[in-house]
Structure formats: structure tokens, C-alpha cells
Image (tube, helix red, strand yellow):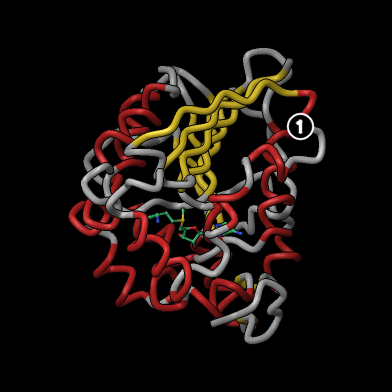
Amino acid sequence: MASENSESNSVNLETNESEELLNMLPPCPNPNKEELKTFEIPSYLTDVYNWAYVKPKNIDFLDRPLSYHIILFGQGWKLMEEYLKEINEGTKMLQIAHVYGNIIPEMVKKIGTKGHLDVIDAVPYQLERLKTKLQGIPHSNVEMWVQDASTIFHREYNTIGIYFLLHEVPNITKIKIIDNALKAIKETNGKLIFIDYHNPAAYNPVRPILKLVNTFLEPFAHVMWNKEIKDFANNADEFNWEKTTYFMGAYQKVVVTKK
Ligand SMILES: C[S@@+](CC[C@H](N)C(=O)[O-])C[C@H]1O[C@@H](n2cnc3c(N)ncnc32)[C@H](O)[C@@H]1O
């Protein structure tokens, strides 16, 4: 298991691989193409989550609606519905990180052709998966590119979504991602939506299971039980933070708007 400060084993894309990556990418506002040549998958992904998010064979196996619903103890539909409820038709949205299952295709349908969706992920193969899931849905208004969410976003959005990402990243990365997202929401009517783990009630039957998962598989997740998402924001007081919890406290939705 890696520690929060682990910097080892980061993946350097060799020149050929980065050329391929550049060819694969659609034109995007960021990152600077020179930066992409030295792009590194964040070390916590290769150290801790290599099996889940980096190895293509495992990604193919796990990226199915059934796995998504099992991992969330059958609450996946409810959480997806709560997320989609916050996304308006015609919005200009940034989705920070790919999500397994069919949630992003559902977002594309909800946003419709008058809106726009940007999707970023730190692992190129995750975006390849997403492309296959969008076949058959009109999606000329969807752009995607490889970017570490702890680096700055170069567009402004009405809506930014972060779905079950925070618990997977080290605390310092949580802070950077949240600050970047808060800077990229529009002053008026902009909103940032989080869905993530929360502190399950003492009587929640899945509490001990989640505790074991946090101990052995998800070293950066337990802090979601002790801290509020806004505790990771530098300028939290400039925003409204509205929290709702689900499934006896195990999950939370937080909607952030500018005061
Ligand atoms: C959103 S989270 C997991 C969500 C959920 N557990 C699921 O079933 O998909 C997983 C994604 O986050 C991406 N990711 C992790 N750290 C990232 C970062 N710093 N920047 C961008 N994407 C990141 C991973 O590559 C992976 O595709």
C-alpha cells in the first residue's frame, strides 16, 4: 500500500507513446502540447490503483454497469439520478475523470446537443473506453483530453462534476482539484457537484465492509468520514456548500455555488 506522500513509480510516457497520445487527442484548450510529452500519470494511480484504473485489461473488465452497481451496494442508480438532477439541458460542463458504467453517456443525453461537455482523465485508456461508450449517441459537442485534474483548467463552466474521485486521491491532490474547479465555475449560476463517500451511520450494515476496503484498498478514502469536502477548499467561505447524504450516511452529494 502506498503512503499519501508516495512519489515513486510514476509513469513517464516515452517519446513514441506521447506522439501517439498527441495524435489520438482532439484539439483541446489545454494542456500545452509540449507539456504532454512529459505527462506523467499521477504516482498514486500507478502505486495504489494500477489494478483498477491503469491496466487496460482490468479497465475493460471493471467498466461495466454491473460492477459499478455492485461496488455501490445497489445505490448506483440513486446516486446517478441525484447527479443527473443537477445537470441542466444546454449546460457547458466539465466532467473531471471518467466514471465506470453508463453515467457519462446519460450525462451526454441530458445535456443535449445545445450544451457542451468536456471530459478529462489522467489515464489515456480511460478516454478510449469513454469513446466506445458514446458510439450511437450524438456527441459532436463532447471533447475529451488527458489531463491531471490537479493542473489548472483553461475554460470556464456552468457546471463541473466530480463523481467518486476525491476519496481516491491524496489530500494534497484533493485540495488542488477542488481549488482548480472552484476557479473554473462561472461567477453567476456556476455550480460544482460532488458525489462521494461519507461517514456511514454506526448502524449502517455496510460500515464495517467500507472500513475494511478503506484500510486495505483505498488509503486516501477514510478522511471522507472525518472531514467535510469544504475543509479541503482554500476559499470555502466564498461559496455555499449544500450537502445531502444517502444510504444511512454512506454517500454524499455536495453542490457548491458562488455566494
Ligand atoms: C472517477 S474515479 C472512480 C469512480 C468510480 N469509482 C467508478 O466506478 O468509476 C476513477 C477515474 O479517475 C481518474 N483519475 C484519478 N486521478 C485523477 C486525476 N488526478 N486527474 C484526472 N483523472 C484522475 C482515473 O484515471 C479513473 O479513470
Quarter holding residue 157: top right
Task: Where is residue 235? Give x, y as percent.
Answer: 81, 33
Residue shown at 24%/70% (left/top)? 61
Of residues 81 and 139, which is closer to you in this image? 81
**In-image side of 18 versus 231 (left or right):** left
Of residues 226 and 233, which is closer to you in this image? 226
Of residues 70 and 93, which is closer to you in this image? 70
Q: Residues within 10 Å of mark 1 (few under 14, many from 20)?
A: some
Residue 253 vs 132, above or below: the answer is above
Residue 35 vs 18, above or below: the answer is above
Task: Where is residue 183? Give x, y as percent.
Answer: 75, 34
**In-image side of 54 versus 82 (left or right):** right
Tell which residue pokes out farthest to the front in this image.
Answer: 203
Residue 200 vs 15, above or below: the answer is above
Residue shown at 26%/42% (left/top)? 75
Task: Where is residue 84? Give x, y as percent.
Answer: 37, 28
Tell which residue pokes out farthest to the left in this image.
Answer: 66
Does ligand 1 reach within 8 Å of label 1's beta carbon?
no
Residue shown at 24%/37% (left/top)? 77
Of residues 106 and 136, which is closer to you in this image? 106
Type of residue at label 1? Ala
SS label for mark 1? helix
Task: Where is residue 54? Give x, y as percent.
Answer: 45, 73
Query: In the picture, which quadrant includes the C terminus?
Result: top right
**Residue under numbered circle 1:** 236
Residue shown at 54%/68% (left/top)? 21
